[in-house]
Image (cartoon, rainbow, N blue to C red):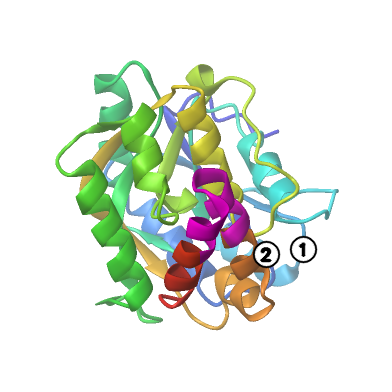
Amino acid sequence: MITLAASPHGFVVMAHGDSPFLDGCLRSLRAQTAASAIVVTTSTPSVFIDRAAAAHDAPVLVNPRSEGIAADWNFAMSATQARRVTLAHQDDIYFPDFAARGLGLLDDHQDAVACFTGYNEVDDDGQVTASKLSFVKHLLELLTLGGHTVARGARLRAYLSLGNPLPCSSVTFDRDRIGDFRFADNLRSNLDWDAWLRLAEQGQALARAPERLVGRRHNALTATSRLIRDGVRQREDLLMFRRLWPSPLAEAIAFVYRASY
């Protein structure tokens, strides 16, 4: 474990394979206006990852259990002693005020176990772009959360009921408040959606800033794209909708949602 207790916030970058976007992600974390410690975790160690991390003075921790996405995410959650942790995805970039805004949200909302910001989709060069999927997710956020700065209970469930508009990479966890939290190891695509729904069912609160402070990539190299190609995303989406809606309606919603991929 890397000790980041001296920092109020830590980014844990989950690296997998040799992503050409890892350096850009790390560079964006070093450019934050609020000081944050940075650690890289991986279950696929390589010289490429070591060099990218060293260039940004970030230590690398290797997960000895290469058992899938949930194992990697749970390992990342425990890779630092920092109280507030963001699981940064290697393909994404973070705009300079992300960490400061998240820390402020958690200070202002003492009952929130985590917070999240808005995000934009970006292309391979880091320029803001858009897709059907991002349009649908932004619309869901607008319709269900509006101007509210805290999501919990029925409002949080409504936000999650027509898809997963909340990417894990935009979330900062307060580990003192969230307790013994773990991602479910029976999912590969929707483990974050499942996590938010479980928190909603427990009555937990998530603080929210609508500013779009994360740039998320969707291209053929990302894990999400691979899961869609393999059919995993479609199967797990249907499982989630069946938890939220009666079966015939769940299948209809899943069919429409699939069209936005």
- The answer for how far apart the CA atoms under marks 1 and 2 are is 6 Å
Image mark for residue 44: 1
Region in magenta: 238-251
Q: Is residue 171 visible?
A: yes
Classify 10 Å Cα crowding around label 2: few (below 14), some (14-19), many (20 and above): some
Per the picture, the main secondary structure of the magenta-coloured stretch is helix
Q: What kind of residue is marked 1? A: Thr
**Residue at 42%, 43% in the rendered image:** 171
For numbered disc 2, what is the local secondary structure? Answer: loop
Position of residue 166 in the picture relative to residue 1 (left or right): left
**Residue at 54%, 63% in the rendered image:** 251
Query: In this picture, is 71 found above or below 237?
Result: above
Task: Reply yes or no: does residue 241 show up in magenta.
Answer: yes
Task: Reply yes or no: does residue 257 show up in magenta.
Answer: no
Closest to the observer, 119 or 127: 119
Residue 173: x, y in percent? 47, 33
Q: What kind of residue is marked 2? A: His
Position of residue 118 in the picture relative to residue 44 (left or right): left
Residue 198: x, y in percent? 55, 33
Image mark for residue 185: none
Classify 10 Å Cα crowding around label 1: few (below 14), some (14-19), many (20 and above): some
To which quarter of the image does residue 256 belong? Answer: bottom left
Outermost residue on the front side: it is: 248
Residue holding disc 2: 16
**Disc count in the image?**
2
Q: Are marks 1 and 2 in contact (CB under 8 Å)?
A: yes
Residue 166: x, y in percent? 41, 51
**Residue at 26%, 29% in the rendered image:** 104
**Residue at 69%, 77% in the rendered image:** 230
